Amino acid sequence: MGDLSSGKNAPKTGGGAAGSNASPAGSGNTKNNGASGADISNYAGQIKSAIESKFYDASSYAGKTCTLRIKLAPDGLLLDIQSEGGDPALCQAALAAARQAKIPKPPSQAVYEVFKNAPLDFKP
């Protein structure tokens, strides 16, 4: 369906870097608090799957992207989500899908620290 990737340094304000296979992207001054790249990639894939399970008519958004900023609670509850740029129609659809999605609990505190306020690139 597409890619959903997260920047390793969640506080970054510029949005996530484009990636493939839900891989983490970005670098900067913020450490990833001990979370392994595999754990981060795996959890990004779980978030992607959760949102895609509520996303319909993905084919009408082919080639379009939207950067979403998610804020998660330690149990995976979506506290807030906002569009940070991209195709307006895709962003609206992705926001609606994310609000309906059941995002799993992060596997560790270290992974939660990466995703508690993270940019995600959504590409159906």
Image (cartoon, rainbow, N blue to C red):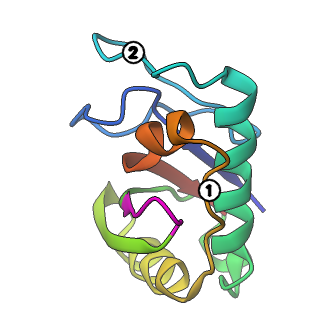
The kind of secondary structure element at disc 2 is: loop
Report the magenta stretch's main SS: loop
Horizontal arrangement in the rendering, residue 17 relative to residue 37 (left or right): left
- Residue at 61% across, 70% down: 103
The amino acid pointed to by label 2 is Lys
* Residue 14 spot, x, y in % from top left: 25, 34
- Residue at 41% across, 14% down: 27
Sequence-wise, the earlier of marks 1 and 2 is: 2
Residue 34's image quarter?
top right
Look at the picture and state if 35 lies above or below 79. above
Q: Residues under labels 1 and 2: Cα distance?
A: 32 Å
Task: Please state the extent of the stretch shown in magenta in the rendering.
Answer: 71-76
**Which residue has dot 2 on it?**
31
The amino acid pointed to by label 1 is Gly
**Which residue has dot 1 on it?**
63
Magenta stretch contains residue 56:
no
* Residue 86 spot, x, y in % from top left: 36, 57
